[in-house]
Image (tube, rainbow, N blue to C red):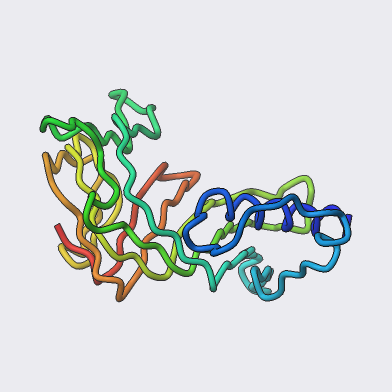
Amino acid sequence: MYKAVLRKIGIFLAGAAILFPSLCGANMHELSDGDMAVVYAQGFSNFSLTTDTNSGISIANMTFANTTISTWTEIGSMKMGYYGTPLGWDQEWLGTGTSTGTVSLGTSGTDLVVKGVYIQAEFSDITNNGTRQLNYFRIGATSLTGTITADFNSFSGTILGTTAIPYNRSNLGVATITSDGSSGFNLTLDKNSGFSFNFGAGSHL
């Protein structure tokens, strides 16, 4: 297992050289087993599990505090959580109807930048195989900088810089969510309320 992990890290580094040749300043070459065996990664991720002894609620956290992701991505649409009476989407983000007709994460001139990625899950009665339940699963980041533009035909969640009242399958129309980096965001799948996007106080419409 130890060598397999190191091998994967070595492959990742080799892949980075392929993707970003201008940053490497050297010709690419295949890494030998010996080369990969001396590659180490430290402080990349951290895992914790905490349990409240009174409520029995446990929260599992995996953090990637030193990661930074920059992207300009365009997709045709994004839909999550189709259920209920009447049937509907928790999230239905459509193209904006412009010449590109896409949902845009970032822009051609300014990337959407995500820092401090984490994955979190909350459990009830985690030690009991018979009654253990997953209450929610969450992917988020502590800092988000940039814009997300779409025709928000249905949006569920919060944009704290705009309103403290949660949106529930709300039609926001064509809009841009702008985040200044002072706070983050998360995508949460809750067993009771479905899919929600939650943007921090540094974000607004």
Task: Report the front residue among 15 and 26.
Answer: 26
Q: Is residue 4 left or right of residue 121?
A: right
Above or below 75: residue 48 = below
Q: Within the image, what quadrant is residue 49 found in?
A: bottom right
Residue at screen point 44% across, 51% down: 188
Q: Using the rendered image of the protein, determine whether residue 151 is visible from the camera's viewpoint.
A: yes
Pick the front one: 147 or 23: 23
- The C terminus is located in which quarter? bottom left
Write down the quadrant of residue 125 in the picture. Answer: bottom right
Residue 180 in the image: x percent, y percent? 24, 70
Residue occupying image coordinates x 38% and y 28%: 82
Please state the total of marks drawn on the protein image: 0
Is residue 51 visible in the rendered image? The answer is no
Where does residue 175 sit, x and y in percent of width and height? Answer: 13, 47
Where residue 99 sits: x, y (%)? Answer: 12, 30
Quarter residue 158 falls in? bottom left
